[in-house]
Image (spheres, rainbow, N blue to C red):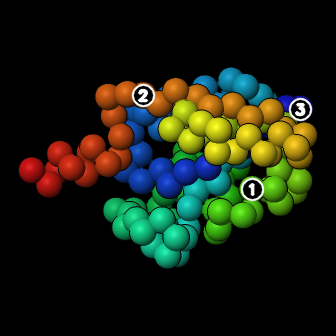
């Protein structure tokens, strides 16, 4: 079984998120999604989410491409997650290109997938403020 992992906040879930998750799942048999906890978003990312962690987790669990949702508590946990969940492929959006190449040293393939260009949570929030 080929296991894939990806990380993100996944607030205001939209079709760009679904595209990313679908393409990530196509790279393997089992998709683990690490979604940022409320504390991590606030303390480290300086992000305020519309939906809390439990709500975002529930939304992700309802998506057919997602097999398991785990909390992302800090930037450094990726190596431990790769080991604990026996990950073969690490996936992120291409706006992170090159940032996680060091994970190849831990035996995983690192893939940066193109974002869906016309949609983002930031854009949705900006549009709603108008």
* Residue 117 picture quarter: top left
CA distance separating discs 3 and 2: 28 Å
Residue 21 makes an appearance in the image: no
Left or right of 70 on screen, residue 16: left
Label 3 environment density (alpha carbons within 10 Å; few <14, some 14–19, many ≥20): few
Left or right of 55 on screen, residue 31: right
CA distance separating discs 1 and 3: 20 Å
Instruction: Say what secondary structure mark 3 lies in.
Output: loop
Instruction: Say what secondary structure mark 1 lies in.
Output: helix
Q: In this view, does 40 lie above or below 104?
A: below
Left or right of 40 on screen, residue 111: right
Residue 5 makes an appearance in the image: yes
Task: Please state the horizontal and vertical placement of residue 27, each as a whole percent of the image.
Answer: 73, 25
CB atoms at circles 1 and 3 under 8 Å apart? no
Task: Please state the horizontal and vertical placement of residue 32, each as a whole percent of the image.
Answer: 71, 46
Label 1 environment density (alpha carbons within 10 Å; few <14, some 14–19, many ≥20): some
**Residue under circle 3?**
1
Task: Please state the horizontal and vertical placement of residue 8, each as a whole percent of the image.
Answer: 55, 51
């Amino acid at each position: 079984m080929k296991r894939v992992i990806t990380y993100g906040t996944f607030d205001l879930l939209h079709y760009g998120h679904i595209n990313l998750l679908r393409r990530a799942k196509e790279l393997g048999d089992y998709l683990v999604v690490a979604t940022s906890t409320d504390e991590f978003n606030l303390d480290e990312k300086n992000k305020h989410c519309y939906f809390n962690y439990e709500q975002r987790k529930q939304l992700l669990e309802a998506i057919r491409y997602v097999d398991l949702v785990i909390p992302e508590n800090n930037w450094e946990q990726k190596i431990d997650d790769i080991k604990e969940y026996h990950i073969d492929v690490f996936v992120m959006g291409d706006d992170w290109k090159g940032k996680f190449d060091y994970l190849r040293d831990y035996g995983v393939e690192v893939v940066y997938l193109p974002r869906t260009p016309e949609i983002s949570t930031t854009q949705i929030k900006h549009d709603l403020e108008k």
